[in-house]
Image (cartoon, coloured by chain):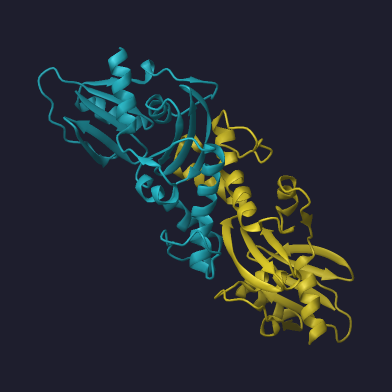
Chain colours: A yellow, B cyan
Amino acid sequence: MVLCEIGNTHYHFKQKGRIWKFPANKKPDIRLEKDEAIYAISVNDAALKRLSSHYPVVDLEPFVSLDTEYHGLGIDRAVACLAVRDGVIVDAGSAITVDVMQNGLHLGGFIYPGLSKFQQLYAQISPRLQKALNFAVDTTKLPQSTVEAISYGVVTPLICSIYVVARHKEIILTGGDGGYLARFFNGAIVDQSLIFKGMEKIIKEL
Amino acid sequence: MVLCEIGNTHYHFKQKGRIWKFPANKKPDIRLEKDEAIYAISVNDAALKRLSSHYPVVDLEPFVSLDTEYHGLGIDRAVACLAVRDGVIVDAGSAITVDVMQNGLHLGGFIYPGLSKFQQLYAQISPRLQKALNFAVDTTKLPQSTVEAISYGVVTPLICSIYVVARHKEIILTGGDGGYLARFFNGAIVDQSLIFKGMEKIIKEL
């Protein structure tokens, strides 16, 4: 069994315990055994179509059932939430989604732009803000330069708002910037296979 | 005496108690009395040059002296800070600057992108996030839809981080979105003439 989560920019695969990613705008090269299929979830229609045209693909979307009042929850968020009974799930990729689970119920969540997106945004606002962001910025001290001010301005608001919605719940970080964000939360868990755990749970219940 | 603060997108004038703005990429039409000059500060070199080529302009920048360890503080931020002895100054325009003053000393500050900049950013991340932001979003409840999630994701992180740096200090809001942000802070002051107050203080001391 091969698992594939398709995001805006990458395919993410899990096969025989190994996890790797591949650009979403190219054809990934997968070795399948006889009668083996790829179980996929996707937020990227074009990339799902590409994968399905080359390999036998089972789209898990119809089988995803999360207890929530949220309308239009991305399938990747829903599947990651299924892997967590109680806690806050932060998926930090090209967008950063923050979702709150309590007793298996999804209470809601918000979306912040991905950290790497901000640099270009500041540059568009003013040439004076056209600086490389420094994600090692000290968030415990008030900034004393433009680079510190814009870096702090990206990171600190996100951290503060995650604390506000978490209210002492466990924080589980995933996605490309999940490891980086872990330093700001005592006791947070980084789990890059969270979404695959959700997918495995769905397949088990099928 | 005419005062002019030149930002990234607009000239802001104060003349005989009246305040108005004008696009920074056009020639503003000002009626000056005999021997009257325009006192200006500017973060927009091209617009300052345009104004100076049509009117007698005194650039106040050399006379701005703020007690700070911050390197490269924008002149508009420095002048607004000069008008406040103790408090947090939030100037919410195309960028949102947040500066902390204590006993006349500038302790530092950070820069968040202007609220109107986020909509385009979300749209660039994914077509699924291409939605009109709703700045009337309820920030006291977890979002239950994409529009709520991205709107909350712009506003709540900013508010949380302002509270964190303010620590019970008075909050003074200015700039185009200053009035909007006031609803989130009990007892906050909206002062659209803050920067002119700082300029008047400088001129008085000359």
Q: Is residue A130 among what the camera can see?
A: no
Q: How many circles with numbers are drawn on the protein? A: 0
Question: Residue A195 falls in which quadrant of the image?
Answer: bottom right
The residue under the point 55% across, 44% down is B161
> Is A73 left or right of A175, judged from the image as shown?
left
> Is A132 left or right of B85, judged from the image as shown?
right
Residue B28 percent across, percent down from the top left: 20, 36
| Vertical placement of residue B107 versus A191, above or below | above
Name the residue at the top extreme. Answer: B206
Which residue is nearer to you in this view: B31 or B109? B109
The residue under the point 74% across, 63% down is A22
| Vertical placement of residue B193 versus B133, above or below | above
Quarter holding the N terminus of chain A? bottom right
Residue B12 percent across, percent down from the top left: 27, 36
> Is A65 left or right of B203, judged from the image as shown?
right
| Vertical placement of residue A36 versus B75, above or below | below
Quarter holding the C terminus of chain A? bottom right
Q: Is residue A61 among what the camera can see?
A: yes
Residue A18 percent across, percent down from the top left: 87, 65
> Is A113 left or right of B96, judged from the image as shown?
right
Residue A42 percent across, percent down from the top left: 66, 74
Which residue is nearer to you in this view: A51 or B162? B162
Question: Residue A78 falls in which quadrant of the image?
Answer: bottom right
| Vertical placement of residue A29 versus A60, above or below | above
The residue under the point 55% across, 51% down is B157
Which residue is nearer to you in this view: A172 or A10? A172
